[in-house]
Structure formats: structure tokens, C-alpha cells
Image (spheres, rainbow, N blue to C red):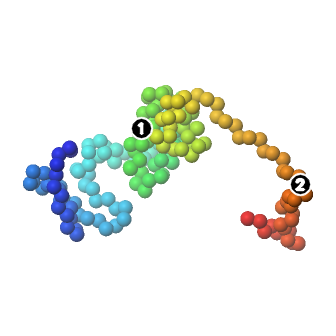
Amino acid sequence: MGQKVELRTTMTTVEIFHQERRVASHCCSYQPGKATTLDEHRPECHRRYLQWPSSRLIHWAQKVGPHTASVVEQILQSRRYPEQSYRFCLGILRLGSTFGEERLERACRRALRLQARSYKSIRPILKTGLDREAEPQPSPERPPIEHANVRGAQYFEDEKGASHVG
């Protein structure tokens, strides 16, 4: 890592050279979304993550609370390959060490309500203390407007009672 390398590509192969010595060779894949990375070319920490089942992260999140578990599950489901989201999930779980698990759970509840399920959304909720504030309540439903120009649902029904709205 951090070294200059040379790259040689053909229609079928990508080769990587360091100081004129080939250090890696990969076959090209023309299948969209199909990775050809060899496990031995991944960083050690990535190899460890790939050995984990997604259920391991969900189980850790469940220990914090149901909202945290829901955020983690939704992040894992948002990627074609759940392993690509492991670091995001671990970052969120680490927020529990920094801010406390109770606050993390409240922040995840707020994030779910806002449909902002990411580390970049949850961390500011914790940093600014929004998790400690009462969540805004939805405004009460107003009664329907009574006015001569408002027709109502019955206007749009045919003689058989079937609605033609929407």
C-alpha cells in the first residue's frame, strides 16, 4: 500500500507490477456487478469481515435495541452484496461506545422516522443532541373543509357506486 505500481491491461487480464515484478494478476469480468477480487489481495480487516454472516451484525445491533437493529438490517439490505455495508454498520455500532447505547437507540429511532439510515445521518443526531429532544408530534388531522366548491367523494362515484378517483 502507498507504493507506486505499474498497470498492464489486455482484453482479458489486468496485471499489477511493483518495481518491475508482477505482484498481482486478475481476469477481467464482463458480468455487471461480478467482482473478481481474490481474497488474498484484500486487506486483512476486509478478509475478516467477509467471514462474518450478516446475522452477526444484526445480533449486535439487537443488543442495543430494535431501532438500531432495524437500521442495520436496512443498511445491509440496501447493497447488492451485504458485505459492502459492514463498515457502515460497524461505524454505527461504535457510536454506542462513544455516546452510549441508550442514546444510539434513540438516534436510530429518529433516523428511521426521517428515513435517514446511515452513519452520516445518525452521528450528527448524536453530536447535536437531537436524540435527547422530544420528537415533533404529527399535527392533528383537520376536519374536512365544508364549502360549496368542494365536491367530495360522492361526486366522483358513478351510478353503481364505483369511484373513479386516483
Tell me: residue 90, above or below residue 4. Answer: above
Percent x, y of residue 74: 51, 48
Tell me: residue 26, above or below residue 92. Answer: below
Asked whether residue 62 is in view, the answer is: no
Name which quarter of the figure residue 113 lies in. Answer: top right
Percent x, y of residue 47: 29, 46
Q: Nearer the viewer, residue 113 or 83?
A: 113
Tell me: residue 145, above or below residue 62. Answer: below
- Residue at horizontal 9%, vertical 51%? 19
Percent x, y of residue 99: 48, 27
Disc 1 marks a residue whose amino acid type is Gly
Left or right, residue 114 beside residue 72: right
Decide: few, some or many residues near mark 1? Use Cα within 10 Å; few <14, some 14-19, many ≥20: some
Disc 2 marks a residue whose amino acid type is His
Percent x, y of residue 93: 45, 36
In the rendered image, the residue lying farthest to the bottom is 159
Specify the label residue 147 is tagged with.
Answer: 2
Q: Which residue is mark 1?
A: 91
SS at mark 1?
helix
